[in-house]
Image (cartoon, rainbow, N blue to C red):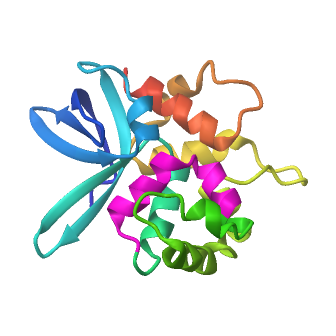
Amino acid sequence: MIAFLKGIVAMKSSSKAYFDVNGVGFEVNMSLTSLSALPDVGMPATVLTYMQVRDDGMALFGFSTEGEKALFEKLIGVSGVGPKVALAALSYFSPDDLVTAIAAEDVARVSKIPGIGKKTASRIILDLKGSFEMNAAQLRLGQAEAAPAAPADNGVRDALLSMGFTTAEIDLALKGAPEGAGESTLLQHALKRLSFL
């Protein structure tokens, strides 16, 4: 399983980016949101990835945040929603807006996603509406809990350690992070800095 890529942005299109990782080219399908977060061609970048393996081949899907990746994985778990439709959803809505629409059971809004009709929109809402409250912290999409939590950078440090970064790299990457930022913002800040190390 390829969990992330760290390399040079070789090329970008409206739906894909190509990364040069030590001379090996990777084609990565991405949402418009994640594509717009990438640096210019020729610059280093790090993206989280999801690898799909099928009988007819393999495909990589890339994300700029853990929240977007987690939501993608939830969406493709819904019957009738494949990776392309999930990326269309994440291109049309921000993760927060999509979660809000699903939690509000707003079939009309969800069915505006290209490739999704009212029937599939209803299925997405039915399957996912109850999961966001329980998993808001995991998805990095919910509001902060009222009770004091552990410092936000603890979760980010754990995530970066699991990606293979050293504690020294993580310390350097978190320097200059915005004060009081949530985990999603901190992770994005750290990954951007790590792509230049």
First to last magenta residue range = 81-101
> Residue at point 72% right, 54% down?
142
> Residue at point 46% right, 47% down?
91
Is residue 140 in sight in this rendering? no
Quarter of the image that includes the C terminus: top left
Measuring from the top left, give residue 165's x and y in whole percent.
41, 39
Measuring from the top left, give residue 134's x and y in whole percent.
72, 70
Measuring from the top left, give residue 130's x and y in whole percent.
70, 76
Magenta stretch: dominant SS? helix
Q: Classify residue 27 by image quadrant.
A: top left
Q: Is residue 96 magenta?
A: yes
- Can you say whether 64 is above or below 116 in the image? above
Q: Nearer the viewer, residue 179 or 108?
A: 108
Q: Nearer the viewer, residue 174 or 146?
A: 146
Q: Classify residue 50 by image quadrant.
A: bottom left
Quarter of the image that includes the N terminus: bottom left
> Residue at point 69% right, 66% down?
106
Is residue 97 in sight in this rendering? yes
Q: Nearer the viewer, residue 13 or 50?
A: 13
